[in-house]
């Protein structure tokens, strides 16, 4: 009977030791998971911000392209050829 009691006591100690180990490990994993979730939230916020800025730039470029089609795409080219010779309106001698 004494051997059974010692065996039971040793099993309890072993069980408690594993329990403490598992508890500590679960707390570490939980902490890591919370840190990852926090990082995911920050990355998502940055993504949303960049996506909004990208949309703004796309709209801006689209409006510029429309404006250049309306006003004529060759505005700069045509002003240099008005005076002839491509010298900014000056005639060559």
Image: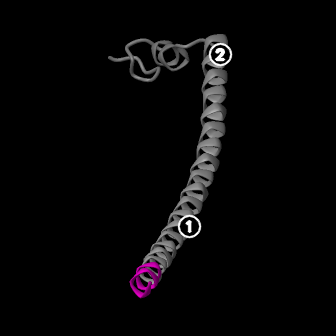
Residue shown at 43% from the left, 21% from the top: 90
Q: Nearer the viewer, mark 2 or mark 1?
A: 1
Of the pair 35 and 83, the residue shown nearer to us? 35
Instruction: Give whichever of 55, 61 is nearer the camera.
Output: 55
What residue is drawn where x is 45% and y is 73%? 18
In the rendered image, the vertical position of residue 68 relative to residue 25, given as above or below = above
Does the stretch in magenta take in 4? yes
Tell whether 43 sits left or right of 13.
right
Q: Is residue 5 magenta?
A: yes
Q: Is residue 53 above or below residue 37?
A: above
Residue that numbered label 2 is attached to: 66
For the record, the magenta segment spans: 1-8
Residue to which mark 1 is pinned: 31
The residue positioned 51% from the left and 63% from the top of the image is 29
Going by the picture, which residue comes out furthest to the bottom? 2
Q: Secondary structure at mark 1?
A: helix
């Amino acid at each position: 009977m004494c051997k059974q009691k010692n065996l039971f006591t040793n099993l309890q100690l072993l069980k408690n030791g594993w329990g403490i180990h598992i508890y500590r490990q679960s707390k570490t994993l939980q902490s890591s998971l919370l840190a990852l979730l926090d990082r995911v939230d920050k990355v998502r916020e940055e993504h949303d911000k960049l996506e909004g800025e990208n949309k703004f730039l796309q709209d801006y470029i689209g409006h510029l392209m429309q404006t250049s089609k309306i006003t004529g795409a060759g505005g700069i080219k045509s002003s240099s050829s008005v005076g002839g010779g491509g010298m900014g309106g000056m005639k060559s001698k």
